[in-house]
Amino acid sequence: MKILAINGSHRKGKNTATLLNTVLDEAAALGASTELLELSDLNIKFCAACNKCLNKTQCSITDDMAIVEKKLLAADGILLGSPVYWVNVTTLMKNFMDRSRYLHLYKNVLDGKVGAALTTAGLLYGGQETTLKIMECFLQFHGLHVVDSRDPNEAIMAPLVAGSLMEGFKDGKVIWRRNAVDDELLATSCKQLARNMVKLIRQLNK
Ligand SMILES: Cc1cc2nc3c(=O)[nH]c(=O)nc-3n(C[C@H](O)[C@H](O)[C@H](O)COP(=O)(O)O)c2cc1C
């Protein structure tokens, strides 16, 4: 079982990467082989809107998207991570989404895989739910089965992996976290997300 995480953060190895790695570590402990792909390492050009992908599963641009395609096709589970930029995904993540159109339009070649998404932001209530929904809709349009971090045995656990650097507000001052993963509830949700992904991949591959 392969789980591929794609990081849309413009900062490699920071908060979003830490959260993605927390999910991947748990998935690896459950027997999955895992990989974290940093979009910031790749050279992916903008979609040219040439519409050639209307009639065939092919993109007219030759660049590092071919690397991503290979990894997407080989994966059983695809985990997207993006920090919130203006209540939205980052430019890198949106560009990846646009360029993946050829894998979806003529034929949904990623159909039937398991998908999940996570996000983090600077602020509490900084646009996390909207950003997460954008990534989950994208995965659903590609035909993936999208799981969240709901623990089936624990009704009060957070169903969303939506972090923040802002911990709260006390005595007129904002309290900041060093890293989003320092939120214990969020770290627990990351692990549950991994368990839910692995469980569904196993069920689908039976
Ligand atoms: C261009 C830009 C836009 C941002 N927009 C938001 C926002 O709308 N809401 C928010 O809470 N944080 C916003 N942030 C803060 C990031 O979401 C936050 O720093 C996050 O932890 C970055 O993830 P990283 O550590 O993986 O880079 C923005 C940051 C940048 C650079």
Image (tube, rainbow, N blue to C red):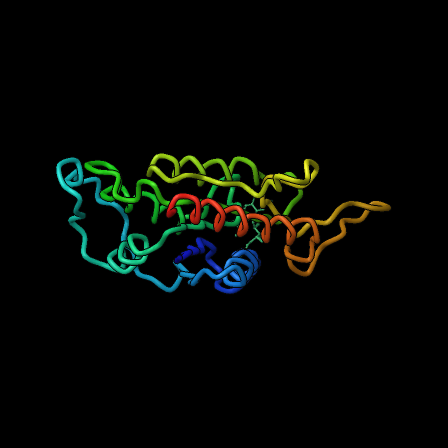
User: In screen coordinates, is 94 left or right of 44?
Assistant: right
The part of the image, by quadrant, that contains residue 2 is bottom left
Residue beneath the point at 51% across and 58% down: 27
User: In screen coordinates, is 154 left or right of 55?
Assistant: right
The part of the image, by quadrant, that contains residue 65 is bottom left
Residue beneath the point at 51% across and 65% down: 13
The image shows residue 31 at horizontal and vertical percentages of 48, 61
The image shows residue 195 at horizontal and vertical percentages of 54, 50
Q: Nearer the viewer, residue 9 or 101?
A: 101
User: In screen coordinates, is 190 left or right of 7?
Assistant: right
The image shows residue 62 at horizontal and vertical percentages of 18, 57
Above or below for 110 versus 16: above
User: In screen coordinates, is 111 left or right of 118?
Assistant: left
The image shows residue 79 at horizontal and vertical percentages of 45, 50
The part of the image, by quadrant, that contains residue 144 is top left
Q: Nearer the viewer, residue 8 or 123?
A: 8
Residue beneath the point at 72% across and 54% down: 176
Q: Nearer the viewer, residue 161 or 61?
A: 161
